[in-house]
């Protein structure tokens, strides 16, 4: 999955696979990448459109979807 850089102090890049509804997130502080599963396309779209990507991620995605480090 290809990730794109984002303008955020906490997230370095994000990527999305609509077929599997998998979101990849790379964190600035650690450089680690996590995959979040069963994330609908509209949530990914809202993430990219958010005025604060980090705040939206923490409020709407971080604890709402299962995830694993990769």
Image (cartoon, helix red, strand yellow):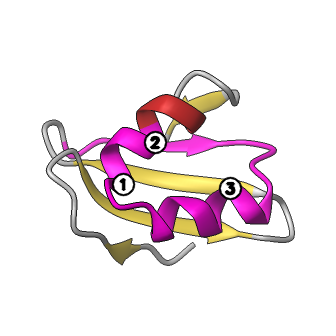
Q: Secondary structure at mark 1?
A: helix
What range is drawn magenta here? 31-57
Tag 1 and tag 2, C-beta contact below 8 Å: yes
Residue found at x 75% / y 63%: 42
Mark 2, residue position: 57
Q: Secondary structure at mark 3?
A: helix
- Give percent across and percent down for residue 9: 14, 50
Q: Is residue 64 left or right of residue 32?
A: right
**Residue 46, magenta (yes or no):** yes
- In primary-sequence order, the first of circles 3 and 1 is 3
Give me the C-alpha separation between circle 1 and circle 2: 6 Å
Residue found at x 74% / y 49%: 39
The answer to whether 21 is drawn above or below residue 59 in the figure is below
Question: Within 10 Å of the Cα at label 2, are there few (<14), some (14-19), or many (20+) other Cα atoms?
Answer: many
The answer to whether 24 is drawn above or below residue 69 in the figure is below
Q: Is residue 26 left or right of residue 19?
A: left
Mark 1, residue position: 53
Residue farthest to the top, as pictured: 63
- Give percent across and percent down for residue 48: 48, 69
Question: Within 10 Å of the Cα at label 3, are there few (<14), some (14-19), or many (20+) other Cα atoms?
Answer: some
Residue found at x 21% / y 44%: 10
Mark 3, residue position: 43
- Give percent across and percent down for residue 51: 34, 61
């Amino acid at each position: 999955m290809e990730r794109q850089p984002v303008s955020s102090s906490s997230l370095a890049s994000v990527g999305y696979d609509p077929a599997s509804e998998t979101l990849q997130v790379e964190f600035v502080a650690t450089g680690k990448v996590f995959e979040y599963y069963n994330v609908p396309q509209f949530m990914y779209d809202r993430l990219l459109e958010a005025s604060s990507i980090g705040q939206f991620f923490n409020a709407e995605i971080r604890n709402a979807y299962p995830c694993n480090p990769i």
